Image (tube, rainbow, N blue to C red):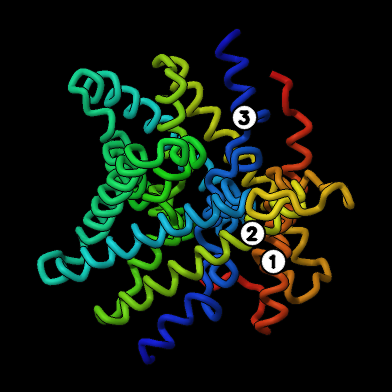
Amino acid sequence: MEYLLLFIGTVIVNNFVLVQFLGICPFIGVSKQVSTSIGMGIATTFVMVMAALASWLIQHFILVPLGLEYLQTLSFILVIAALVQLVEMFLHKSIPGLYRAMGIFLPLITTNCAVLGLALNAVLRDYNLGESLVYGFGAGVGFTLALIMIAGIREELEFADIPKPLKGAAIALITAGLLSLAFSGFAGMI
Amino acid sequence: MSLGRTFFKGIWRENPVLRLAVGLVPVLGIAHLAINGVYLGLATAVVLLAAVLVKILFANLVSKEVGIFVDFASLTIFTTLLYRLTGVYQPELLVQLGIYLPLVAVNGFVLQRLSVDQPPAARIADALGMGLGYTAVLTLVGMIREFVGLGQFFGRAVLNGSLTPFSLAATVPGGFVIVGLLIALYNALSGTGGEINE
């Protein structure tokens, strides 16, 4: 039950993108088509779960016993970078179409603040291994959900008559603002 | 392009947030107060400049393939250093900036600047201009959100009840909308098309 609450809380109530602002870079860049968004979401979710696992192991078996907590950021980033490299190699080999579609955004998962933010937050809140994994998975699902929603809206916006200066990033951000407003209705639910 | 032009393009013509739409996380996450914008913008600028200097120094030793890892390493090292120094000298600031200070290391804007290939002098001018332009936008967004949302100017109450603050501006959704409108205003003023320049 606790895990379920944590999961729903992470996906909806504290959605990483719409409520916590994390992971906005790929959010604006990749969210033009629903199909690309799904791929990006799944890849990010995978990296997030792995990052939650890896950062928990590093924190509890290396950093704390050795008293090196201040190396958190450094070690987490390096682990995340390595994980992304793995995903990239895998996609390149098995799903080349998706690999091309994601283009420059794949390496950007490394610099996706949502991934590092998740690792840092999990440590900050003293989650145990199970909670960290649920938290990582929830963050990924929440990220994917937000990405798909915004992509769906942006696909429709293609046909709308938007004033020229508002095209692109501007309208995407305002749309995200409205979605975020809707999500803030969930605040305090859990 | 002359060094002066390289410097100034970061402030207006190729402003990281308004033109390139990168490095948005702190703009939305932390800049609901103007002072936060100043601090975080300067922190980002310092880390960027330090990483650029490292890149110039080791340019001949590091091959292209491992370059990105060297960038990550120097960014995280400088961010960690800054984090430790802030913790020693300004512990309250550390609490105020929260998770966004360590996140400087993965700011997409910083990495994007590092990946642009140019001669050393231009690199430094570029880092200075972009860092300054980034700080300016963070501060501007902070000022707008603080004034509209809380009726304050750098922590000082200025409205004195003559106008009710519109608290939405200081919250998450307000941040999205205000940055979106700023980008639209920038597009209208500079005459650039709205499409993101990737």
Left or right placement of residue A101 versus residue B85 in this view: right
Residue at x-position 36% and y-position 25%: A53
Left or right placement of residue A15 versus residue A65 in this view: right
Label 2 neighbour load within 10 Å: few <14, some 14-19, many 20+: many
Q: Residues under labels 1 and 3: Cα distance?
A: 29 Å
Q: How many marks?
A: 3
**Residue hosting label 2:** B141
Res B195 → quadrant: bottom right
**Residue hosting label 3:** A11
Q: Chain of mark 3?
A: A
**Residue hosting label 1:** B182
Query: Label 1 is placed on what type of residue?
Result: Leu
Query: In front here: A92 or B107?
Result: B107
Q: Chain of mark 2?
A: B
**In this orientation, does residue A73 appear?**
yes
Pointers 2 and 1 in contact (CB under 8 A)? Answer: yes
Left or right placement of residue B38 versus residue B68 in this view: right
